[in-house]
Image (spheres, rainbow, N blue to C red):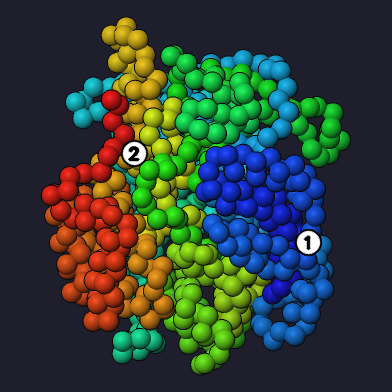
Amino acid sequence: WWNLSPRRERTQKSATLTMKVSASFISAGPGVASMASALLWATSSTNAFLAPSSSTHSFGARSTPVASSSPSSIASRASSSSCILPRPNSRNDLHERTRSSIQTSTSLYSSSSPSSPISSPTAEDECDVLVLGSGPAARAIATLLSSPNAVDAAATSSPPLDVLLADSNYDRRWIPNYGVWQDEWLSIRDLFFSFGHSLDDDDCIDRTWSKTDCYFGGSFDIPAEERMRLDRAYCRIDRDGLRRCLSPENDEGGKARYRVLRARHVSKATSINIYSPAGSLVHDDEGSTILLQSKPFSSGEDRGKEPATTTRVRAKLIIDCTGHESRLVLKDDRDSAPPPGYQIAYGMLAKLNEDSIPDKTRCGPYDKDAMTLFDYRTDHFPPDSLEASKAETAPTFMYVMPLNDNRVFFEETSLVARPAVSFRECKDRCRTRLEYLGITVEDIEEEEYCYIPMGGPLPARDQRVVGFGGAAAMVHPSTGYHLCRAMMGAGAVARAVREELASSSKSKAEYNPDRAAARAYDAIWTPDNIAQRNFAVFGGEFLMKQRVRGLRGFFDGFFKLPLPLWGGFLAGWPGLPNNERHETWSARLVFGLTFVSKLPLPVALDMLAAIVGYSISEGLALPQSVTPLLGLPEGYEYK
């Protein structure tokens, strides 16, 4: 088991360590962040190639240990363990069979770079919209901005834009395993079709389960073996297929029409619309000018032969999709929202040894014809043990996607916590759970380390760089769902930007980039949407404070609600199915009262106390979301 963490994983962890540590300084303010960034990046060239015996990832104020990479430690643990997972014959053999990856909020698709010398521009480019990043959010918004047609509510169409997408990591494969509700995916498909862009299920969906299972037994007289079955279909996205569908026609055989530049920005916001190094990003009355730097060759025969090249790009608008820890999009320091919580998960795509299993329709207790969304049971730990105590106070659950034959994706997940649960803890618990359930892993095709900030403040107002996706805090603050929210949100932003640029062109009026950026932000975060998010932020804060007993009672009551009520809360975004059940203060009030009535009495009383305490400590955000008397939150309208 411990040998299933190749050396390349250690390199990736070390390389991302500096970015995560710098996030702690960023929260302290721009000045501290600038000094910390310079210090940390000065040592990154050394750290990135070291393989220390242990390392830490910084989440907020506390560093959380990650599994030791020391070969001696690995060997000692492997020899003392009685686990039934495979041990490869050699580390070299392991490298051939296992791919390890890390998903971080700074993103595997980031187009930012550390402070480094900028060469004089050797090329020039110009576009209507520059999109930074190349993950799902970036490719979705670039696809819709450049699509052949977009019809608005008034049945008028806006012309496509010249869109340039820039990311030095553009060719990197997407890492996460994306799961979506089928009805939400269908709404996304319809949206993209309205822009003249098709997302065929054959290309984008890997598998669909008609049933979704949950296990909340072990508390409130719910038997541990009791299964809750949800009559709602769930899908696994074919990440490679979706990536192709959101890629340009001349690249990867895609259908999109944007252009690609394999380069990254080198700027860092020090205050609103001011960046360092000086001159790397400048705004004026007609748009923005930014310097983008390509990667030099770093391997093979061409290593060191070709230096990084710099391209000066002129754009009417810049959209930053580089992730939660964007270097260009600042958070609103006037926002009273609590700091983010963190979803941490260890996942693996495994091949199971089922030679001694008579019933091939199941893997342990899990039905292969169903997707298991939650398994919050802890009976795999010895009673009164240290492990059981930790699982009670810092809960994790198992998430299971049976694929084909004996291939299954397992993921042990901490839903949301502050400070974060460590990757190592999730990996240990995954191993222990599978052992207890008698599930024998024959081979591991890939591993996933997932780190998702949830909640936290929204972007600062009056910024000329438009944050989108994680950079705009679009992740659901209670659940961590993001893909469908970002893809649906891309439609509203694309329409607003296309209409703004088209209207100035048709009327021959002077283009106003400040108004264009404000309209884009307002398309993401309307006052109504901010109010709905504030309601969900409280949900995330409440979940963070629960022990496993409270979480079992919470979700057992949650999924006993009518599907439109719980489905709308999980969606949490305009345009997604059932969201109308949460878009108004009255709808949220009805949801809250109905929900409390479904909860076990101790959990209901705890929630009522939390509502009072949160309203006192955090101000008007929660009361404002469930009453008309306090008005709506401040939006991003252009003034």
Which amino acid lies under the numbered mark 1 shown in the image of this protein? Pro
Please tell me whether mark 1 sits on a helix, a strand or a loop.
Answer: loop
Nearer the observer: mark 2 or 1; the answer is 1
Q: Is residue 251 left or right of residue 187?
A: right
Q: Residue furthest top?
A: 508
Location of residue 56 in the rendering, given as x and y in whole percent from the top left corner: 66, 62
- Please name the residue shown 50% across and 55% down the image: 452
User: Could you give the CA–CA distance between mark 2 and mark 1, rounded to whole angstroms?
Assistant: 42 Å
- Please name the residue shown 28% across and 55% down the image: 619
Q: Is residue 399 left or right of residue 13?
A: left
Which residue matches tag 2? Answer: 524
- Please name the residue shown 37% across and 14% down the image: 511
Give the vertical position of 26 relative to 258 (above or below).
below
Earlier along the polypeptide chain: callout 2 or callout 1? 1
Q: State the image quarter where residue 294 is shown.
A: top right
Which residue matches tag 1? Answer: 52
Q: Residue furthest bottom?
A: 383
